[in-house]
Image (tube, rainbow, N blue to C red):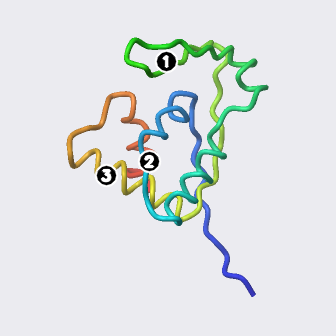
Amino acid sequence: MGETTKEITISLNILERLQIHAFLPIQGDFLELTIKDDIEKKVTFSQEELDKFKMVPTPAGDGTVNWNWDNQKEEEKKVAFTDLEMNLVQKNIKKADDEKKLTSEQLSLYKKFVQDN
């Protein structure tokens, strides 16, 4: 019989769903990259959400993309994270905190993933 995996459900707003990518590895071993892919699938926006929240990408001067959306329509999404997914995000958030590289936009993720769990 298979081992059950514990899941922790966290409500994430639009900014948090965008910001969580900063705490996912660009490189790693097979397991880390598989976990990263699983997290990305959970937090990505459906076409319906993009339309509902009126999300519009705007190119930034540095080659990145800024997202704008209708704050009046925003709602949180409950996302269930496995232990492995939680550990990966927590590890990278703690690393950013230790290196004093957290931004104010990422503070709520720190609170939800590290302080509250």
User: Local crowd at mark 2 within 10 Å, few (<14), some, or many (≥20)?
Assistant: few
Earlier residue among tags 2 and 1: 2
Closer to viewer: mark 3 or mark 2: 2
Label 2 – label 1 distance at C-alpha: 20 Å
Q: Is mark 3 on a helix, strand or loop?
A: helix
Disc 3 designates what residue?
Answer: 94
Label 1 – label 3 distance at C-alpha: 25 Å
Q: Residue furthest right?
A: 48
32 vs 74: above or below: below
Question: Image point 63% across, 33% down: which residue?
Answer: 76
Instruction: Kindly indicate whether the residue at mark 3 contacts the one at mark 1 (C-beta within 8 angstroms).
Output: no
Disc 2 designates what residue?
Answer: 26
Q: Give the percent coordinates (x, y) of residue 79.
A: 64, 47
Q: Give the percent coordinates (x, y) of residue 67.
A: 54, 18
Q: Residue furthest left?
A: 99
Amino acid type, residue under disc 1 in the picture: Asn
Q: Give the percent coordinates (x, y) of residue 7.
A: 61, 62
Q: Is mark 1 on a helix, strand or loop?
A: strand
Label 3 – label 2 distance at C-alpha: 17 Å
Closer to viewer: mark 1 or mark 3: 1
User: Local crowd at mark 3 within 10 Å, few (<14), some, or many (≥20)?
Assistant: some
Q: Is residue 45 left or right of residue 12?
A: right
The quadrant of the picture occupied by the C terminus is bottom left
Amino acid type, residue under disc 3 in the picture: Lys
The quadrant of the picture occupied by the N terminus is bottom right
Q: In this view, does 62 lie to the left or right of 65?
A: left
Disc 1 designates what residue?
Answer: 66
Q: What element carries label 2?
A: loop
